[in-house]
Image: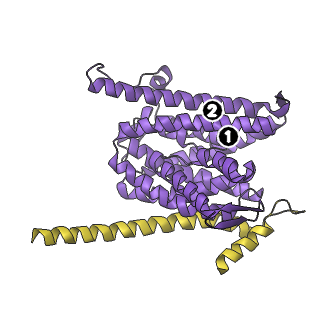
Amino acid sequence: MIFDVYLPLTDLYVDGAALIALGLVVGFISGFFGVGGGIIAVPMLYIFFNIPFPIAIGSSLALIIGTCISASYRHHHFGHIDYKMGLIFMIGAFIGIESGARVIQVFKQMGGISILGKTIPAPDFAISLIYITLLFCIGILMFRENRNIKRKSLGIMNSVIVKNFLIERFRNFHPRPRVKFESAGIHVSLWTVLSISLIVGFVTGLLGVGGGFILVPAMIYILKVSTKIAIGTSLFSIILGALYGTLTHTVKGNVDIVLVTVLLVGSAVGAQFGAAATRKIEGPRIRFYFSILTFIAALMSAVKLLLKILLG
Amino acid sequence: MPLANIILHISRDANPSEPGFQPSGVYIAICILIPVFMGVITGLISSLVLRIFRKSRTKTEVSGDL
């Protein structure tokens, strides 16, 4: 250990340098891909630092606030944020998170299922499975798109447009009123944007994860926003959800501010580098890396679910 | 480090394992304000560093032209 940090909530001594290094990685991922980074931070804190799950979740939400603000600052300078779209996402996400949290309360009364002799809430299990499947599907979609781009560059394919029944339906859904998003350069139905934000917010409220993994691909493939604008706008809209999540977790005693502060030293800096890296790398390449990250996130979620089953 | 000691002291008070646990308003405010503050400060510092870097690069380019 280079220097020890005492965490009062868990009564643990952890390696401060290792925490800063973890923050640096989480921050870079957040700034580069437009995600909160909680999906990486939570299992890492649990596995490598023995931080209990509730405190890892609550503290990572507080971490997301600082990381996203830091990365948004840089993306703002690059002109990568559409504030109008971000605000609509924030409003929808707030309604979605609130309804997701209420649904959890209803689900809690429904009892649990027994797996390997341990009982876990049945809806928790089902929703986690759906989320893992969704992440795999998004990963495959983006991975295939990248392969198609490569084929096109080799002259094997003529089109690189991602075609999917559901995506096409959403794309052709144009009820009024329509809103013009200047920075993103699109003119779409307000209902399409609101539906996406409600779905993302609902998933966030149900699973306690940042919506970036769904929001970024939804903006790229459904709203046809450029990858860099999608990343910047996603980071900006995640802030409100993280603020709300931190508040509720702090009241429940799940946020260790000492842990958050040490992690933020690394993540706020990492977020700056991640955001800066988006300027150097082309959109399709970012989407390819995003597909790999989505597979990792799906794997992490599977590990989290497995740990829940094993620990009861 | 007085600030670190204050945070540590407030954190001890916010320990949920203590009987009759209820986090203080100060602790809730700190949990929100520290991440916001650190995010803004890092953003400001980086933009300042970038501005200085750009200025120095422009000066070098100008002197190079001469």
Q: Quadrant of residue A63?
A: bottom right
Q: Which chain is yellow?
A: B
Residue projecting furthest to the right: B19
Residue closest to the eye, A90 or A208: A208
Residue projecting furthest to the left: B66
Please give the name of the residue rendered at 33% of the width and 49% of the height, measured from the top-left corner: A280
Residue closest to the eye, A232 or A88: A232
* Label 1 vs 2, first from the N-terminus: 2
Question: Numbered disc 2: what chain?
Answer: A
Label 1 with label 2: CB-CB less than 8 Å: yes
Q: Which residue is mark 2?
A: A131
Question: Numbered disc 1: what chain?
Answer: A
> Tag 2: residue type?
Tyr
Instruction: Locate residue A258, reporting x and y percent.
Output: 67, 65
Q: Which mark is residue A207?
A: 1
Say if A266 sits above or below A100 in the image.
below
